[in-house]
Amino acid sequence: MKAILKSSPEKGLTFTTNAPEPQVVSQSDVKIRVMATAICGTDIDIYKSDPDLTHRMRPAMPVVTGHEFCGEVVAVGGDVVRCKAGDFVSAEMHILCGECVNCRTGNGHACIDTIIKGIDADGCFAEYVVVPASNVVKLPEDLPVEVAAFLDAIGNAVHTLTPVSVVAKRVAILGAGPIGIMGAKIAKLSGAREVLITDVNQGLLDIAAKHGADQTFNVGTEQGRQAFIDTCKNDPAARGVDTVLELSGHPSAYKDLFQCVRMGGEVVLLGLPREPLTVNFTRDIIFKGLTIHGIIGRRTYDTWFRMLGLIQAGLLDTLKAMVTHQFPLEDFQKGFDIKLKGEGLKVIFKPGE
């Protein structure tokens, strides 16, 4: 079958037409024909051969990459009753052990022995993928495949907002990438009083302004950055926003984070810093009385039900706007070149085209 592979620790990915087509082996397996699949930030790091990811992937190489997708069920194991051939589905690509303390206490999203398809095992940048039936999520038949292709990322945005109540709150979002823009819309749907968003890309900020952000700030200049900090602090009773979502991972954003949040505020961290950060814990966290939430993956399967509900509640138009490029799988390099240049939002591959 056609597939995109990470075959070595060297930078880049390869396209093949000779990858082994996965088959239903376990009685609980489901085989899915991939209709659409999307590039995630993690896929960009895999392309660049991020040392941590490359080290983790090495035992599985060559591995089919990709973990955001939707498709049609084509075969099921003998014990599978919750889905059947012809169903329109997606799947949670974190395969949980089911035995660790987190799995046994309802916190499987933090499973200590997670297998991630597309990293530890073959993923969905291919014509077919096989997953456990328990990981399959049925989708509404009228959901556009281009949107259904990146439910994984939508789940990240939903999970980022889940630990905090933003009703009547002022919310600052640092980073106007796809998850940041989705986060702005979700915050407004969830009752946020005001949503401020920052980035260094004015085009992304313009999109955010159409999809939930009340004010946008280009922090690529010191003037823009100071305008953001001043706006956050212009409430004399709070002197800062109630909640900050850090989605960029950039060191300067972390510096802004501790200046813009009020005392007693909440911070939610999803962005991944690519270099060590210096934080004054005494001044910036302890003496400010902050509550900090670290986000990994999606809560299985609470987040999936939440995101499907939010799509029905008004998120769909924003999600459609996220899709900026579509290619057949053979043209994967064009899609990755776009993302490597920092252009576009969600890039979709369609293996059947």
Image (spheres, rainbow, N blue to C red):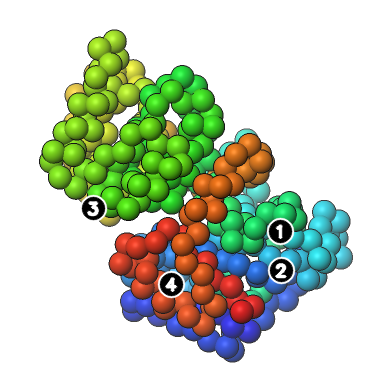
Which percent across, then down, holds residue 324? 46, 62
Q: Secondary structure at mark 1?
A: strand
Q: Earlier in the sequence, mark 1 or mark 2?
A: 2
Which percent across, then down, holds residue 291? 38, 25
Left or right: where 117 falls relative to 228: right
Left or right: where 259 falls relative to 171: left
Q: How much space separates mark 4 and mark 2, taking CA atoms?
A: 23 Å
Residue situated furthest left in the rendering? 222
Q: Earlier in the sequence, mark 4 or mark 2?
A: 2
Which percent across, then down, holds residue 81? 86, 56
Mark 4 and mark 2 in contact? Answer it, CB < 8 Å: no
Which residue is identified by label 2? 32
Disc 4 or disc 3, which is closer to the eye? 4
Left or right: where 29 falls relative to 244: right
Q: Earlier in the sequence, mark 1 or mark 3?
A: 1
Q: Nearer the viewer, residue 319 or 123?
A: 319
Q: How much space separates mark 4 and mark 3, taking CA atoms?
A: 26 Å
Mark 1 and mark 2 in contact? Answer it, CB < 8 Å: yes
Q: Amino acid at mark 3?
A: Glu
Disc 1 or disc 3, which is closer to the eye? 1
Residue 89: image tag: 1
Query: Which residue lies at the image location 61% right of the left edge and 79% below the top edge?
Result: 353
Q: How much space separates mark 1 and mark 3, taking CA atoms?
A: 37 Å
Query: Which residue lies at the image location 37% right of the left edge and 69% below the top edge?
Result: 338
- Location of residue 242 by image quarter: top left
Q: Nearer the viewer, residue 57 or 241?
A: 241
Q: Amino acid at mark 1?
A: Val
Q: How much space separates mark 3 and mark 2, taking CA atoms?
A: 38 Å
Q: Amino acid at mark 2?
A: Ile
Which residue is identified by label 4? 335
Query: Which residue lies at the image location 24% right of the left edge and 19% below the top edge?
Result: 234
